Amino acid sequence: MSSREAELLLAVDRGGAESLQTQIEAQLRHAIRSGSLRPGSEVPSTRALSRDLGVSRPLVMEAYAQLAAEGYLALRQGAAPRIAESAPRVPAPALPARLGQPPTDRYDFRPGIPDLSSFPSRQWLKAVDAALKSMMPDDFGYTQRYGSEPLRNALADYLGRVRGVSADPRQILIVGGFEQARTFLARALRRRGVHHLAVEDPGYRDREVWSTAGLTLIPIPVDDEGIDVEKLAASKAEAVLLTPAHQYPTGVVMSGARRLAITAWLRDKNAIAVEDDYDGEFRYDRAPIGALQGIAIDRVVYVGTASKTLAPALRLGWMVVPPLLLSALEDELRQVDFGRSRIEQHALARFIETGDFDRHLRRMRLVYRKRREVLLSALKSELPDAEIGGVSAGLHATVRLPVAVDEAAVMLRAEKRGIGLSFMSKHHLHAPPKTSTLLLSYANQSEAAIRIALKGLLSALAG
């Protein structure tokens, strides 16, 4: 924006005791010192400000000259006036450390992030352009609060075709990713009378949202077939949080027998399952396993997002909700949320309908499969006694080391080498086993970077 277009919150009182020039100087001085006007930011030209305030231009020029002399403004011939970089400011109060800062390591093995460099920008721009051309005036308002109709229709078709999910579009609620979905779910479950929520152990680390809603968490162990349904049935749980297609973080797939047992438990107990299908589309050795929701449509809340398939920045997720919970979840959304960006929802609908989403997923499966092979090949060569866990799927591998290590010390040494690490132990609700298992993501690093990072990891493990 040029200085002639820049606007500034400033007013003068023609009946005031101070002169107009003094008023302008004082207001600008205060705005700069308080931080309202930041160093380097542009202010209106003298001509524009004099016009906006209805005062003479020489008066504004005198005010600017005085502020420049005091070090508040930077004035250069032919350039827009700006706040001086070294302008005096009142020290701002110290801010608390920000939680959830993104990692800054050069090489990051921590799971959870797809290949951000592969976001299909060109195809997405086409989808946005097509969406804007097709949207009606009402689509730009507060309508379709639970999700745009085109996206709900597109998702109903896509999820049925690719994940085996059975859903009427009206059962699909659009949310801001799994983080927001679980907030609504926790509150809706509690309102339904659920007191005890079973969670996989090991499982997700960030469990506070459930307990904050008043739910007591019951850890249920996971083995090579998924969650232990016998222990689940023996617990007080009235609901369960599951990752059946690719358990997080162990990487195992829930067996067919366990799926049938879970379904029987849900019906016998009149219970609810929350199914997080966070990366179910990525299976490299065979066809992906269908969603649990497909065999228990009246008892499972299916949750999916675009965070792993496209990018977390989209903040688009969806819940497929059984009728018994639909009104409660709509109430939660209506109370605290006005919905996601309709423009991006229409764009994602286009992205799916044109086949660009399927093409992107096919391409990324090849990319991730190759990166997984590079990582596992290097591990077998450099750490032959380590045990690779989980199936050939998802965005990370589990690596159980032959001996237990001082995990905190290894992570510190890795950090000094610019490598981000994560161990399985942090994902246990109860005391972790006396073994050390690494979680190594291969998704957001090139094949060359994986090889370099692994050498640094080996060095960190050696001490």
Image: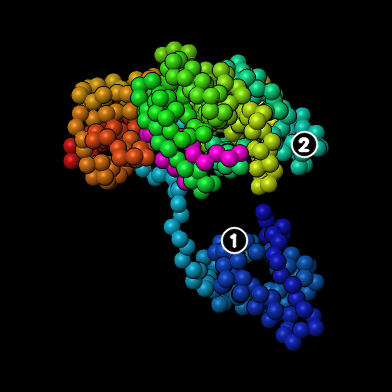
Distance from disc 1 to disc 2, alpha carbons, whole Å, reads: 35 Å
| Residue 276 lies in the magenta-colored region | no
Taking the spot 45% from the left edge, 60% from the top edge, the residue there is: 96
| Secondary structure type for disc 2 | helix
Segment colored magenta: 192-210
> In the visual, does 187 lie left or right of 373?
right
Image quadrant where one finds the C terminus: top left
Q: Amino acid at mark 2?
A: Asp
Counting from the top left corner in percent of width and height, residue 366 is at 45, 18
Image quadrant where one finds the N terminus: bottom right
> In the visual, does 402 lie left or right of 439?
left
Taking the spot 72% from the left edge, 77% from the top edge, the residue there is: 59
Report the residue marked by disc 2.
Answer: 139
Counting from the top left corner in percent of width and height, residue 266 is at 53, 25
Classify mark 2: residues with Cα within 10 Å, few (<14), some (14-19) or many (20+): some
Q: Is residue 194 above or below residue 55?
A: above
Residue farthest bottom in this picture: 17
| Residue 203 lies in the magenta-colored region | yes
Q: Quadrant of residue 457?
A: top left
Classify mark 1: residues with Cα within 10 Å, few (<14), some (14-19) or many (20+): some
Counting from the top left corner in percent of width and height, residue 362 is at 51, 18
> In the visual, does 164 lie left or right of 337?
left
Q: Earlier in the sequence, mark 1 or mark 2?
A: 1
Q: Amino acid at mark 1?
A: Ser
Residue 193: numbered disc: none
> In the visual, does 451 lie left or right of 131?
left
Residue 405 visible: yes
Residue farthest top in this picture: 286
User: Disc 1 vs disc 2: which is toward the camera?
Assistant: 2
Nearest the viewer among 298 and 106 is 298
Taking the spot 47% from the left edge, 19% from the top edge, the residue there is: 261
Report the residue marked by disc 1.
Answer: 41
